[in-house]
Image (cartoon, grey):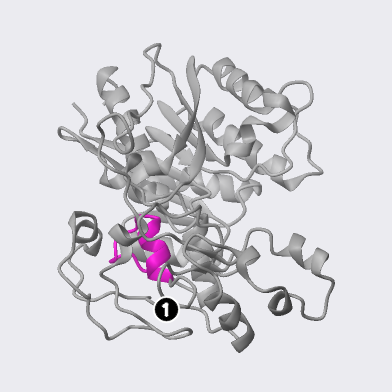
Amino acid sequence: MKKEAHVLDLFSGPGGLSEGFNTAKIGNHTFRSVVANDNDVHASVTYRKNHPGVEFVLGDISASEIKRKIVRAIKAETGMNTVDVIIGGPPCKGFSLTNKMTRNMKNPMNRLVMDYVAMIRKLKPKAFVMENVPGIFAMEGGKIVKDLISEFRSMGYYNTDSWLLNAADYGVPQIRKRAFIVGSRSRIPIEKPRTTHGSNGQAPRVSVFDAISDLPKIPDGSSSSRAAYKKPPNKFQRQLRNGQRKPTQHVTTKNSDLVLKRIRKVPSGGNWKDIPRELMQVNGDYEKIQKAHSMIYRRLIKTEPSVTITNFRKGMIIHPTEHRLFSVREAARIQTFPDSYKFEGGLSSMQQQVSDAVPVFLAKKVAEAILAHLEMDHKL
């Protein structure tokens, strides 16, 4: 019986989904990413550095030559013309459907979703996982997801379902909801991952300080490349240290004096509304500034899970107790990347990569659900 299921990761970014799938295990069964694809250069370097055994195809999957390279890479890595599972999160901003799955070629975002569908149609994996923003469920009154599911079922993925999962319910120290469309050729249902944290006698949700309290204090705009961890870790911190002796990439954005004045005015759980008007009204109309700053300058509450980490520099996510923005390593902890996971590129690129990724612990729970399904269906 096959013990290792091969995975193709499309729109991989820095590798959050792959990290979750590659760490999932049920009995002797595991996943192994064999080929990955993305068109972001910095994310590709990050992925390659952390997953050196995976063949990475850099380029826009909309191009026919990139699709052919992916197929050739799968053949070279596995000796086969397919993989067991395809995973990925194609951007779907602005996605629309007419006449079921007709492609609107004028919108490149539409094309990317359809390119993902096309790779599933061509490779015919045993199962697939499509990850996306929760808003996909509301697009065109739910028609987008309904038509995608209908299309997958017409391709032979009889058991296709959609899930809305909150990462905080699975041990991630962050309120982050993600949409998943999962499918299998089997008639056996894929069971939605059971929540592990929250109410009803489950483990308490992991808080911001549960995740980052062992990281050393750093001033605004500084890094802590030489400082050691602060104190003996809790279970979460011990797991994410992953054998590291000191934290890396504990670096944060350097801010102006004006921004630091604003940050100091924001209390725990507060946001830009707590900043005095005179500090916000700079060279502009206050009402316009209100709209521009509606989701920024949020100081996290140390005893609760984080708000959703988007781009934490642009979003001005503030440390719970220090007067500075989040560091790359702190955000990576909130996204449940191990401390051994290194991000490549400039500071802005690293910040974007971390915030765009799928939380590793959430990806692992989804992977375990797929692995359990394949095992139950004797597909491994």
Of residues 173 and 149, the one nearer the viewer is 173
Residue type of the residue flagged with mark 1: Val
Q: State the residue lying farthest toward the top.
A: 187
Q: Give residue 285's position: percent from left, percent from top.
A: 84, 71
* Residue 221 seen in the current view: yes
Q: Give residue 14's position: percent from left, percent from top.
A: 45, 59
Q: Is residue 30 left or right of residue 41?
A: left
Mark 1: few/some/many CA within 10 Å (<14, 14-19, 20+): many
- The question of residue 339 being in magenta is answered with yes
Mark 1 = which residue?
Answer: 251
Q: Place residue 67 in its image quadrant.
A: top right
Say above or below: 130 vs 298: above
Q: Place residue 313 in its image quadrant.
A: bottom right
Q: Residue at x 37, y 52 (%)?
A: 173
Of residues 8 and 122, the one nearer the viewer is 8
Say above or below: 90 vs 85: below
Q: Residue at x 47, y 83 (%)?
A: 220
Span highlighted in magenta in the image: 328-343
